[in-house]
Image (cartoon, helix red, strand yellow):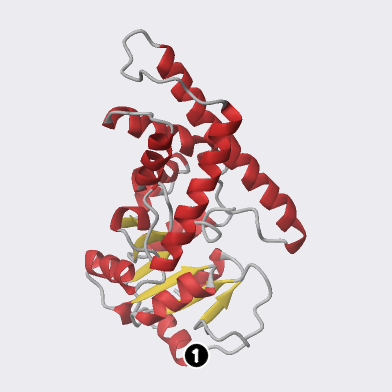
Amino acid sequence: MKFEQKKLNKFRMGDIKAVIFDLWGTLVKDENIDESKKFLNKLNKIYLSIKSINSVYNYLYKLSKKPSTELNIALPGRINFISKFFKIIKIEYQESLKRQEQIELDKVFNRIFNSFNIKLNNSQSTEVLGEYYKSWSNMTKLYDDVLPTLIYIHDKGIKLALISNTIFEGKLHDSDLKRLGIFKYFDFTIYSSDVGVRKPEPKIFKVVLEKLKVSPDEAIFVGDRLYDDIKGAKSVGMTAILKEKRPYTGEEEIVPDLVIKNISDLKLYL
C-alpha cells in the first residue's frame, strides 16, 4: 500500500478547511461489506425493489378507488405491473450509464405509467416517488463511528459536505440524514439527481468546492469506491481517501492518497 507522505503531513499541519463525504458505504451502511454476503445482499435488494414497486402499485390502487380521483384508468395486474417496471427501469439505468448522465426517476416513472395509460398530476407523481423511496429509506443506518467523528470534525471548525450518487430526490436523503441526527453538521449536501451528473464527473465536485468556498488543495474527499469517489476527487485536484471495505492491494489503476478502515481513523490526521 503506497501513501503520499507529503499529504499525510499536510493533514497534521491543519491546512484542511473542508472534508467531503460520500454517503452509501461510507457514512451509511450498504450491507455489502463481506464478500460472503454478496448473494444475500443481492436478494435483499431485489426484495426491496419489489417491495418498493409494490408500494407504488398499492398507492395507485387506492388512488383509483377514490370517488373524486382523476385517475380514470383500469390498473393492470400486479405481476404485469412489477415485471414491466423492472424491465423499463433496468433499460433506463443502463442507458444513463452509457451517457454518463444521472437517471431521472420521475421521467422513468412517467414512461412506465404512459405504457399503462396512467396519467398523474404533479402532486400525485411526487407522492408516488415518496412511496417508492420508503422501503429504501428504512434500511438507512449509520456506521457506529460516524456521528462522533462528524462532531469531532465540526468542532474543529472544518466545513463538512456530502456528495452522493442517487436516483432519488435529494430532499428525501436529507430527511434521512435529519432522522439519523447528522444533517445539522453538514454545510452543504448535493445529490446527482439534483444536478444531472454523477460521480466521477468533475462538475459535481466543483459545485461543492464553490459552495464551500475552498480550493481543491484545501479539501479532502472520503469515499468507498475507487472509480466514483477516488477518481472523481483526484480529477479536480482534491486529496482522496478510500474507506476500505475489502482489502486494497495497491495494484489498482486508481490510487488513493490514503486508505482507512474506519471513518474514525480521520481523527489521526485532522
Q: Residue at x 35, y 53 (%)?
A: 193
Q: Nearer the viewer, residue 89 or 37?
A: 89
Horizontal and vertical percent position of residue 81: 53, 33
User: In the figure, is residue 270 to the left or right of 144?
Assistant: left
- Amino acid type at circle 1 is Glu
Q: Nearer the viewer, residue 103 or 1?
A: 103
Specify the quadrant of the image occupied by residue 83.
top right
- Helix, strand or loop at label 1? It is loop
Examine the rendering and report whether any part of residue 31 can be seen. Answer: yes
Examine the rendering and report whether any part of residue 152 can be seen. Answer: no
Horizontal and vertical percent position of residue 243: 56, 70
Q: Residue at x 37, y 53 (%)?
A: 185
Horizontal and vertical percent position of residue 251: 63, 88
Horizontal and vertical percent position of residue 42: 67, 52
Q: Nearer the viewer, residue 86 or 148?
A: 86
Quadrant location, the C terminus? bottom left
Give the crowd class for mark 1: few <14, some 14-19, many >=20 residues within 10 Å: few
Quadrant location, the N terminus? bottom right
Q: Total of numbered circles in the picture? A: 1
User: In the figure, is residue 128 to the left or right of 250?
Assistant: left
Specify the quadrant of the image occupied by residue 219.
bottom left
Specify the quadrant of the image occupied by residue 12.
bottom left
Q: Nearer the viewer, residue 40 or 28?
A: 40
| Residue marked by disc 1 | 4
